[in-house]
Amino acid sequence: MASVLVTGATGYIGGRLVPVLEAAGVRLRCLARQPAALASRVAPTTEIVAGDLLDPASLDCALTGIEVAYYLVHSMGAHGDYRDTDRVAARNFGEAARRAGVRRIVYLGGLATGEEPLSKHLESRIATGHALRESGVPVVEFRASVVIGSGSLSFELIRALVERLPIMICPRWVSTLAQPIGIDDVLAYLAMALQLPDGENRTFEIGGTDQASYGDVMREYARQRGLKRVMISVPLLTPRLSSLWLGLVTPVYARVGRELIAGLKNRSVVTDPAALGVFPIRPVGLGEAIGRALRYEDRAFALTRWSDARSSGGARPSPADARFGGKLVDRRQIRVAVDADRAFVPIASIGGERGWYFGTWLWRLRGAIDLVCGGVGMRRGRRDPDAPAVGDTLDFWRVEAYEPGRRLRLAAEMKVPGRAWLEFEVTPDAGGALVHQTAVFEPAGLFGLVYWHALLPVHAVMFGGMLRKIAQRALGGRR
């Protein structure tokens, strides 16, 4: 089995590919600018090395002994002209791969067909493939249309529009023809590239069995969710105006959205079916791809999201109030100068008699309101003061996942217009540990959205204060 390097393992595609390769027994190495951020996501057998695509000297060690390298990064979220950043990063990586004797680079790019001039985003995707090939290392390039999967940027844009807007004003890009492909099929193609014989450069266009417009994708999503939606076409709506609008109602930040929408003018259908002849993969159709995305949403949430990715330019969206599909997320983290086990002690003993470390009276007030509304309130406490177990009640939460010294996930059982979770995770960091705190809410209808946004100021105070107190207790050794 070949020794394999994956770049972009903290991103959407790379983060999904890593466990597929691990399950296949591949000798795997991942490149990351911050290895500690990846350590808890990979198997113990996977090696993590520090490196930066914009720092050529850091790539030689990462590629030593590697036979096949996956290039799954892009810089669309970076500041400045991301096309230049993409080209430089690809050139650096290709040259380092050549020096290291890598026999193949596998790259996932974008699919565009027709005579329409390419958008900046698609132009950059195709130029990245050219830059990798200029290194002289054989490149297997897959060009994909819209990827359907919980957490993918395009799918989450479509999902958010359909979920939140009963009446949609649809610009021209909604009618552009594409050939959507399910995330599982994309991963299957990427994994099977390891089995190709050595040789020349190959480019494969990949897509599902159905050609469909973005409007068709929206309608199929609405059908499977049982939603009635009215779509009104308008002749003019510029990418800039569309991106600002999308920034209000979808997970897409305005600047990234503008680049994405500009690319939706380009048709993306498969014109060369060579992939079907080379690989024993028969991609599913649009309906099945959306169905899988909906069925596996919770699993996907636990894996990766497009917003997890750090571009090769170093940019990353703000962690607070991120959106993932039907879920709203408040992420925070703090660094403590103690080891991970010690940092986890106050997390393992939170709630019950010890309270919630900050604003406990607010938690009790919330419990009293819950009790009046017919909920469980705060009266249940906790079974064990120091060590929870999966299934335990913890005030008005229930322990859904528990890994000693690493992770505690609580599912809310108070009365809320939706579903809610609170998760703590501790990961080693140089000279200490990082404490991650994530509050997740899946709203039920418009009232659920109003509930979440009305409480944002309260969440900022309570969750921020609680995380600081956890860090203080970890440093002081107090339970």
Image (spheres, helix red, strand yellow):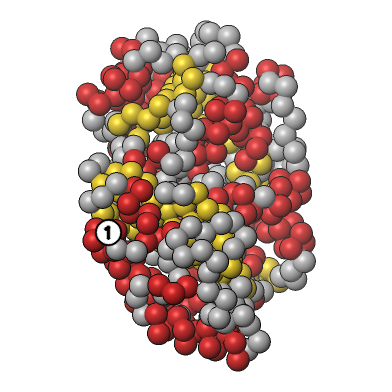
Q: Position of residue 53 (x, y in %)?
A: 30, 31
Which residue extends farthest bottom? 372
Q: With respect to residue 142, does 147 lie above or below?
A: below
Residue at the (34%, 64%) spot, across then down: 479
Residue toward you, 387 or 351:
387
Q: Residues within 10 Å of mark 1 (few under 14, many from 20)?
A: few
Q: Is residue 456 toward the left or the right of residue 155 in the image?
A: left
Residue at the (33%, 23%) spot, across then down: 62
Q: Is residue 96 toward the left or the right of residue 38 in the image?
A: left
SS under mark 1: loop
Residue toward you, 310 or 89:
310
Q: Which residue is mark 1?
A: 477
Q: With respect to residue 104, does 165 lie above or below?
A: below
Instruction: Determine which quarter of the picture holds residue 157.
Output: bottom right
Instruction: Determine which quarter of the picture holds residue 393.
Output: bottom right
- Determine if residue 82 is in view: no
Give the position of the N terminus as an image quadrant. top right
Residue toward you, 7 or 238:
7
Q: With respect to residue 53, does 69 lie above or below?
A: above
Tag 1: amino acid: Gly
Residue at the (64%, 76%) spot, across then down: 445
